Amino acid sequence: MVSHEIGQWCVYPDMGEIDTYTGFMRAKNLEIYRDFLDQMGMLPLARAYHLASGRLQTLCYKFEIEAALRSRSLAGFQLLGLQDFPGQGTAPVGALDAFWEPKAYVDAAEYREFCGDTVLLAAMERMVFQEGGRLEAELLCSHFGAQDLSDVTIVWTLRDDAGNETAAGSVEVPRIAAGGLRSVGRIRHVFVDAGRARRLELCLEISGTEIRNRWNLFVYPRSLSLPDLSGIRVMDGWSPALAAALDRGESVWLRLKPKDIATRIQPGFSSIFWNTAWTRGQAPHTMGILCDPAHPALAAFPTASHSDVQWWSILRHAAPMELDRLGWTDGGIVSLVPDWNDPKPLSIAFEARAGKGRILVTSVDFDAVDDPALHQFESSLLRYWHSAPPPERLSTTPGRLLTLLN
């Protein structure tokens, strides 16, 4: 059995590709999507949308391909193609553009880590942990090279964002036979208390070769000490009391539930499949998150500018707020990359001046599940909002916030 056309994970179209059409054909499709974005006043975000969704696309393909390689009864997999498909509504599903040129967010060397003759794999139950939790991983090698591998040393390391090694080990394997999937060892590691949220990179390498593979793991404190809430009014929905508090100059956190949000846009962890115009609006309708990792609201929540596994539970229990209803083109603290057919400024967390006060609005159900990443995200926002200065750029009125609600 060979799986057929797996993946088809999209990236937000690259508007810079328009200028590469210098022959008989014209990139009218991309021009239309560019104009959609421009009409919303969001054209300056085009490059950021492309890069952030491209990193999510790469992650989706990595997980899809690794799942296929770990499946012992699967003889192989077939991608639709390595390049974008400009027909049938436009499907930017490739790691290469329509001209077979590399894209800015990934290169061949990274793809070879998880898609090649020889691929190291780690079968893990989870990638999000709490301190004191145990990493249990079976090490596998998918080897379809020309010959067997002899006297192999597989080295594993855990490194933090600064490149410091926090744990390491090695496995000696006398022989890895060609032509299949082999179990080659195990990792057992307990995450010690560090008192802070961390992102760690797990790396597997075959010593003396260029064969390696990597995954990001996230480790969170077992207990969260929340700041004093006495200076913040926390509200779970709209009420006259909220407007009055803002008019008095108070600091308000409006914690909306997904069911409260007026939107038909369904987020998801994975990216859009093919093209929503051709799949009758099949969800998800978003392409991952976009944020500034240096924003102080995310100081206690390690993240890149794009989605990684720690956002899975958050996005599963969130709904996008359509901020064009407020007359904005900005997505706030954490925005979502929209569908290129219907671009809107989407957010799951934003701040604004409202009346004489300031307001933080979130559209995540923080009580939905007992998930360490979900709780850490809430804690990081709360720490920021406890001492944050009034936002300089975005402002609204208490009444206009009602346009976000059902």
Image: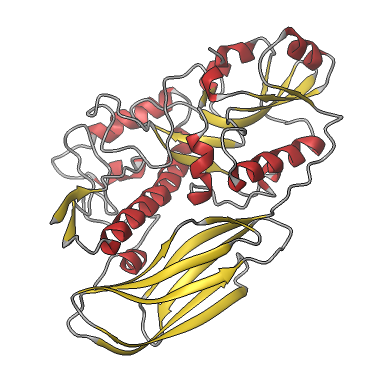
- Report the residue at 49% width, 66% height from top: 136
Residue 139, position as x, y percentages in the image: 39, 72
- Report the residue at 59% width, 71% height from top: 163
User: In the rendered image of this protein, does residue 143 appear above or below residue 54?
Assistant: below
- Report the residue at 56% width, 23% height from top: 328
- Report the residue at 63% width, 30% height from top: 350
Residue 125, position as x, y percentages in the image: 45, 57
Q: How is the image coloured?
A: secondary structure
Residue 371 in which image quadrant? top right
User: In the rendered image of this protein, does residue 118 appear above or below residue 10?
Assistant: below
Judging depth in this view, the residue of 337 and 211 nearest the camera is 211
Residue 183, position as x, y percentages in the image: 33, 74
User: In the rendered image of this protein, does residue 316 appear above or below residue 354?
Assistant: below
Q: Can residue 292 be seen at all in this image of the molecule?
A: no
Q: Which part of the image, by quadrant, shows the N terminus?
A: bottom left
Horizontally, is 132 left or right of 234 in the view? left
Q: Can residue 19 be seen at all in this image of the molecule?
A: yes
Horizontally, is 214 left or right of 168 in the view? left
User: In the rendered image of this protein, does residue 195 appear above or below residue 40?
Assistant: below
Residue 3, position as x, y percentages in the image: 17, 52
Horizontally, is 278 left or right of 200 in the view? left
Q: How many marks?
A: 0
Residue 212 in which image quadrant? bottom left
